[in-house]
Image: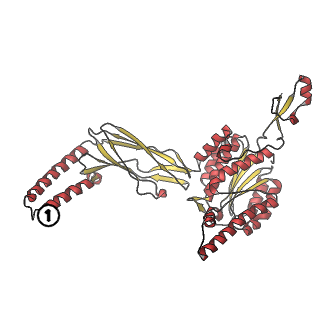
Amino acid sequence: MKFFKSLYIHKQLYIYLAIISVCFLMSYWIHFLYSLGWILVTLIIVLLTFDLIILYKPKSAITARRILPDKFSNSDNNIVPITISNLYSFKVFLKVIDELPIQFQKRDFLYETSLESNENHNFEYLVRPVDRGEYFFGHLNIFVSSVLKIVKRRYQFQNEQMVMVYPSIIQMQKYDFLAISNSLNEFGLKKIRRIGHTSEFEQIKEYVSGDDFRTVNWKATAKRAQLMVNQFQDEKSQPIYSIIDTGRVMKMPFNELKLLDYAINSALAFSNIALKKQDKVGMLSFSKKIENFLPAVSKLTYLNKILEVLYNIETKFTDSDFGLLYAQLKRKVTHRSLLLLYTNFEHLSALKRQMPYLQAISKKHMLVVIFFENTELETLINQNSTELQDIYHKTIAEKFSFEKKLMVKELQKHGIQSILTKPENLTINTINKYLEIKARGLI
């Protein structure tokens, strides 16, 4: 039974059989083709038997291995390497079919190659998950045929391998490197002019060209008989919270990824940078109820706990309770903190309904409301419209787009910071706002 399950007919055999059939058909008019047809039948049977023997004589002459990491990074291209070895004593032709997880909805994976005797071959392919969770890979199927190409033998390896898809670890590492190298502006993050000084004094040092004259320490200058200046550093250990709205407004997809997942990826990358800058980082998720709350901590190892909580967050189909959020912050977050609220408003009226709670939160904390541009509307706005119906659609799209800009003005009017961003630029703009607030000493 195992033999028959692994045995497949090569398409080349059907070509041979078609040629034989033509010979028998034409033998009605050309008689010698009848004998030729039977000779070919005999030859095919001999070659078929020989092909079966050389392919099945070794118990296992092909080895293959799919190398999976412990975690995939959501919304990023993840590499899946495969290594294959040929232990046959002759050249073989291979077709590789990997059974990808059902979440990818890809059923046409095929990789073809040939291997000489005792040759190893490595290749890799990319997968891009757009949902967090468990991804199960099926069999790694290798179909082997000899140079005769009459039958194929199937080998199967590594069934039911599971990989966990976590928030974008790749994105987090990318911005982590940029933060260390002070090159954030290369990725679109603008440089912020420092206004005044933060409150944390670091040391007194000798004046060098370019130092601000306003920082001259005259007492130290008199003692040392040379110009000495005070050096300041960014204030550290400031509490910063990523607050994620998991209500129905965050279910909207852009480029196959939900707004919630954009927010989660951004919160992870931002938290990593804030911890590297020695600030305290916490998080909160809410909809109809408070789902997760992590107090602000400055330990680098705390990022693992944040990652595990973000992994399990899912959107709900309910309206979020901002009053409950205000009550939770009032009770749990007692020190003035920077609050990054990831949410979305499609209508100005929706923002105004929540404005009293946002105002109440901003009185005690530095609140930044982060919401999203509808990039689908841009397509409608920028297209040339000639039909009356298309003009209506374009006008409505422009109205919704203009309302987003009005929301920014409405928040500014009440002294609340905001970020209106395209989903794909969320992480960049969030980090930029954080650097701006730190530079201006607003918290």
Judge left or right: residue 389 versus residue 429.
Answer: left
Q: On screen, 310 above or below 394?
A: above
Q: On screen, 413 above or below 45?
A: below
Report helix, strand or loop for mark 1: helix
- Place of residue 430 in the rendered image (x, y in percent of width and height, measured from the top left): 69, 51
Q: Which amino acid type corresponds to the residue marked 1 in the rendered image?
A: Leu
At horizontal 54% and vertical 54% (from top left) the residue drawn is: 133
Q: Which residue lies most toward the bottom here?
A: 388
- Place of residue 54 in the rendered image (x, y in percent of width and height, measured from the top left): 23, 43
At horizontal 29% and vertical 38% (from top left) the residue drawn is: 117
Would residue 9 be seen by someone viewing this image from the given angle? no
Judge left or right: residue 440 versus residue 301.
Answer: right
Q: Assess disc 1: are there few (<14), some (14-19) or many (≥20) residues with their C-alpha within 10 Å of its C-alpha.
A: some
Residue under label 1, please give it: 25
Q: Which residue lies most toward the left here?
A: 31
- Place of residue 295 in the rendered image (x, y in percent of width and height, measured from the top left): 72, 49
Q: On screen, 424 above or below 350?
A: above
At horizontal 88% and vertical 24% (from top left) the residue drawn is: 226
- Place of residue 27 in the rendered image (x, y in percent of width and height, measured from the top left): 10, 62
**Residue placed most toward the observer, 307 or 190:** 190
**Residue placed most toward the observer, 269 or 136:** 269
Would residue 138 be seen by someone viewing this image from the given angle? yes
**Residue placed most toward the observer, 322 or 267:** 267
**Residue placed most toward the observer, 383 or 285:** 383
- The mark tally for this picture is 1
- Residue 228: quadrant of the picture: top right
Name the colour scheme: secondary structure
Judge left or right: residue 141 versus residue 376.
Answer: left
